[in-house]
Image (cartoon, helix red, strand yellow):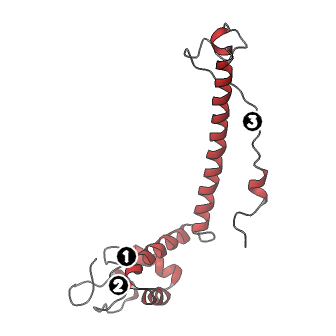
Amino acid sequence: MKECGKNSSSPCAACKLLRRRCGHDCVFAPYFPADEPHKFANVHKVFGASNVSKMLQELPEHKRGDAVSSMVYEANARVRDPVYGCVGAISSLQQQIDMLRTQLAMAQAEVVQLRLRQSTGIINNSPPNNDSPITSSQPKGYSHFHMDLDVDQSNCFNEPMWPY
């Protein structure tokens, strides 16, 4: 990471945005390089330069990089979704997980049903007819069974995801 001040001719992104002189002791310089101005712009917009400076100065140097990464992530999420920020992204991912769990349960139920039918000889020993799950338009060995699987999703929408 480039540092400002003595060894560099251009100020860091933070000092450039704040229009101030970037000294060799600039707390922002190691984390907000001049070639990434958008990085500091969003952090400044969400948290404010003074608050970011205070947070960084209170942390040990070995933890500052992770703190800046977290602030940049939260700031970018907050710019994209001003109301929910990261929580909106987490909520969306949680909904996708719930949907995929439902699909997985349905696929597992279909596998169990296929194995049960295969073990009782329904697929291999019965001739195909109009009511058979195997039709002439499907490849040999392919079957698709209609299943009535009730998935209780009523709890997903009645309880808040984030208790306060």
Q: In terms of sequence position, does the residue under pointer 1 or pointer 2 come before the other?
A: 2
* Image marks 1 and 2: residues in contact by CB distance under 8 Å: yes
Say which of 50 and 69 sits in front.
69
Q: Amino acid at mark 3?
A: Leu
Say which of 129 and 137 sits in front.
129
Location of residue 118 in the rendering, given as x and y in whole percent from the top left corner? 64, 19
Q: Is residue 5 left or right of residue 117?
A: left
Between the residue at mark 1 and the residue at mark 3, the CA separation in whole angstroms equals 53 Å
Above or below, 74 against 13 in this view is above
Q: Residue at x 44, y 86 (%)?
A: 59
Q: Which residue has dot 3 on it?
A: 149
Between disc 2 and disc 3, the foreground one is: 3
Residue sitting farthest toward the top: 127
Quarter of the view holding residue 150: top right
Give the label on residue 37, or none: 1
Q: Which residue has dot 2 on it?
A: 16
